[in-house]
Image: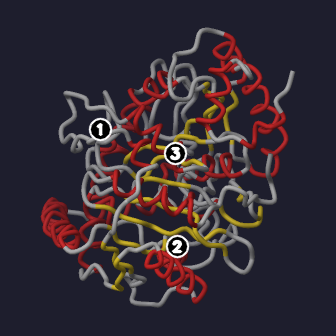
Amino acid sequence: MSFAEYDDYDGLGLAELVKKGEVSATELTEEAIIRIERHNPALNAVVHKAYDSARKVAAGDLPDGAFTGVPFLIKDLGIRVKDMPRTDGTYFKSDALDTDDSRLTTKYRESGVVLLGKTNTPEFGITGTTESARLKPCHNPWNTEHISGGSSGGAASAVAAGIVPLAHASDGLGSIRIPAACCGLVGMKVTRNRNPQGPTDGDRVIGYSVDHVVSRTVRDSAAMLDATGVHHMDSPYPAPQKQRSYLEEASTAPGRLRIGFYTETPSGNPVDPEIRAAIEDVAAQLEALGHDVEERGLGINYRHLYAASRAVSGANFIAAMAERIDAMGRQPEEHELEALTWRNWKGAEARLTAADVGRGWRTLRVMSREILANWQEVDVMLSPVLGMPVPKIGYCDPVHQDPRTTDANQAKTFPFTPPYNFTGQPSLSLPLAWDSAGLPIGMQFTGAYGDEATLYRLAGQLEEARPWKDKRPQVWG
């Protein structure tokens, strides 16, 4: 049997059909496999296929969760999936299979999803484009000459193409929001420690990186956060508790919100005119919906902010590489790491002092207060996600071009997302515009610390007022 209407439903819709007995988890699994085999040659979104185990799980007794029977993919970075490989996008990695699940993987399984495999990611998730020497470039379903974003580019490409309705993603400096923006999806970077990490999460000790999903609908994002966003007693800094279900929030009117919007960039250079026109159009839409909207920036010294972050993240990368070297029992050879990765590692080792790192932490602490103070006067801040239209593959290439060129091009392309990893705030990308070439333009909405609820309420309102459900990429279904 087959279920050709698979593409017409989001994750909650598919799960409802399974629960009613109108379609089986096995049928959904087979439809997803068909789509991987059909589209992956053009996209390179799925880098590990676990069809046999997925078929076995789909045919068995699945948990009664929000997403029972729904096909799902895990990003090939960071979190563990028992009996699956985890390359982290690098050649400097053991090929041994993981022997257990991360806590978040366990929560995904409890939600009822069927794990089909792993999605493409750049080396160590460093870049905002998914182009690695090991896993090769991932392509955008809207136009395969263009990037799918990073570092969750494989996840976004697979969801945008209709392979799965939602997929795991992670965000350290924009790696959920950037690919969501590039591929026309919903991408929520949740509050720090909202979703479980661990029981070992030493590589995320600085707190920048969080995990959630990219999805085609707001309600799928909200429902999955209901399923996974549980408090763990051993979380060092747990996120504030939610007041009610995020799924309920997504269908609740947001009321009249104070919304600030900005296009200021760290370099001071203006964004592309199409991006500027898009955000002004969205701001006008928000005013028409009854919100109080004003143009205002964050009011911070970006140069100081990013200098502090480079010191802290550089020290963290040195520690992560030391742990990897211990695990591998040897130093990496230069050809095993991409030029950008090698430069970042060796440069940090050569330049950073303990005083640099200490000053970086202190500066980030003080400047996070400066950023967060804006939410005393607004409920939500709006900016674009990208400063320019989605670039072509190769523009931010970390493999073949000089690292300084990659740095410069990334700074032009992705100027808006990192501050909210430093502060830990929830920040959401929504597909609210398309450029003249037919590529998505994502808009970033950032809420107060711990306040995903307001973002989901506003997202639900915008999804109804400015729907994107029926927009389809070139590679689809």
Along the polypeptide, which appears first: circle 1 or circle 2?
Answer: 1
The residue mark sitting in front, 1 or 2, is: 2
Along the polypeptide, which appears first: circle 1 or circle 3?
Answer: 1
Give the answer, above or below, for where 106 lies relative to 401: above
Give the answer, above or below, for where 401 lies relative to 218: below
- Give the labeled residue for mark 3: 219
Residue 332 in view here = no
The spot of residue 328 in percent (x, y) is 44, 32
Along the polypeptide, which appears first: circle 3 or circle 2?
Answer: 3
Q: Nearer the viewer, residue 183 or 265?
A: 183
Distance CA(mark 1)–CA(mark 2): 30 Å
Distance CA(mark 1)–CA(mark 3): 32 Å
- SS label for mark 1: helix
Q: Which mark is residue 202?
A: 1
Q: Residues within 10 Å of mark 1 (few under 14, many from 20)?
A: some
Q: Residues within 10 Å of mark 2 (few under 14, many from 20)?
A: many
- SS label for mark 3: helix
Q: How many marks?
A: 3
* Colouring chosen for the image of the structure: secondary structure
Where is residue 32, by image quadrant? top right
